[in-house]
Each structure stands twice: as structure tokens, then as C-alpha cells.
Amino acid sequence: MGFGISIATAIIAIGLILTATVYYERVSDSCELLQDVRDKQHERMLSQLETGIEIYNTSSCSYEDRGKIANSTSDIFYIKNTGTVSINKSKLIVLVNGDIVNHAAWSGWLYPGRKFPTTTFTLDSGDAVKIVTANARSACAEVV
């Protein structure tokens, strides 16, 4: 009877070891996938922190006009990259009064500290303009 118990114990132990080996691989893979997702989330959050844009009324980017665009005949306003990473102009999303506006003429990169004029829009007094970057940072202004 002692020999049968030893064999049964050995079989149970081998079964537990095999089960633990199979589950270890699954748990290990899950942990690696979770770490990869956390790394991507961290990169996205860091990218958002390093990205910043502002909308200005004049070429001198005067801070007293931030958030307002003067309604003039030229409808020019400036977008300035206030962050530390470059922004692809073609990936910017432009909303006027909540509607997406086509800006196919924009190409190239907007480097940190640089600005560029927008001349492709017809704006009326009271319009709300919002510029959104690819990583969801945005700037808003109202036409006055």
C-alpha cells in the first residue's frame, strides 16, 4: 500500500509541475503584453505632455490676443508650436464651429517654437476655431 501512495503522489506532483509550466508561460506572456501596453501608454502620455499649440491673431503672437482672432478681410491666424516635439501639419485637424475643415494645402512639419499662418479659411464673426493635434492636444479661438 505504501508503494501505491508514492506512485499516486508522484503522478500528482508531475501533473502539478506540468500544469504550472503551461500556466507560467501564459502568465508570463500576459505580463509581457501588459508591460508593452503600459510602455505605449507612457509614450502616448509623454507625447501629449511634450506637445502644445496655440492660436494667435497677429504675426507677433501677442499674448493679449490669445483665444481671439480678429475678423479681418484676410482671415489669417497663426498656429504656433509651443511644445518640444515637431508636429506634422497634415495630421492637424481643423474644426470651425464643430465641423471639420479641409486643409489639404498644409504639409511639412511645425517645429517647436515656430509658427505658420493659415490663409485657407473664410471666417465670420462668432465662429469658433479649434485645432487638434494627432495626439489630441488642442487650441481654441473665437473670431471677434
Image: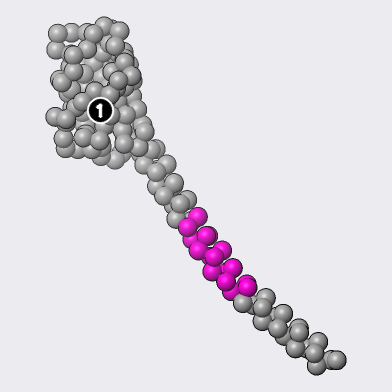
Q: Residue furthest right?
A: 1
**Which residue is at the front of the view, 46 or 94?**
94
Mark 1 burial class by Cα count in 10 Å: few <14, some 14-19, many 20+? many
Q: Amino acid at mark 1?
A: Lys
Residue 24 is covered by the magenta coloring: yes
Q: Quadrant of residue 126?
A: top left
Q: Main secondary structure of the magenta part?
A: helix
Foreground residue among 10 and 79 = 10
Name which residue lies at 56% across and 63% down: 27
- Stretch of the chain drawn in magenta: 19-34
Which residue matches tag 1?
Answer: 80
For image coordinates 15% across by 20% down, the residue present is: 119
Q: Quadrant of residue 137?
A: top left
On the picture, is 3 further left or further right than 47? right
Residue 17's place in the image compared with 60, above or below, is below
Residue 84 point in image, percent of width and height: 30, 39
Quadrant in the rendering for residue 135: top left
Disc 1 secondary structure class: strand
Residue displayed at 44% across by 46% down: 41
Is 9 placed left or right of 126 in the picture?
right
Against 60, residue 85 (above or below) is below
The question of residue 126 being in magenta is answered with no
Q: Position of residue 82 (x, y in %)?
A: 30, 31
Image height check: is 80 above or below 87?
A: above
Q: Quadrant of the C terminus?
A: top left
Percent x, y for residue 86? 25, 39
Question: How many numbered tags mark residues here?
Answer: 1
Q: Which of these two is toward me, 87 or 64?
A: 87
The x and y percentages for residue 6 are 78, 88
Q: Is residue 29 left or right of residue 4?
A: left
Q: Residue at x 36, y 33 (%)?
A: 136
- What quarter of the picture does the N terminus occupy? bottom right
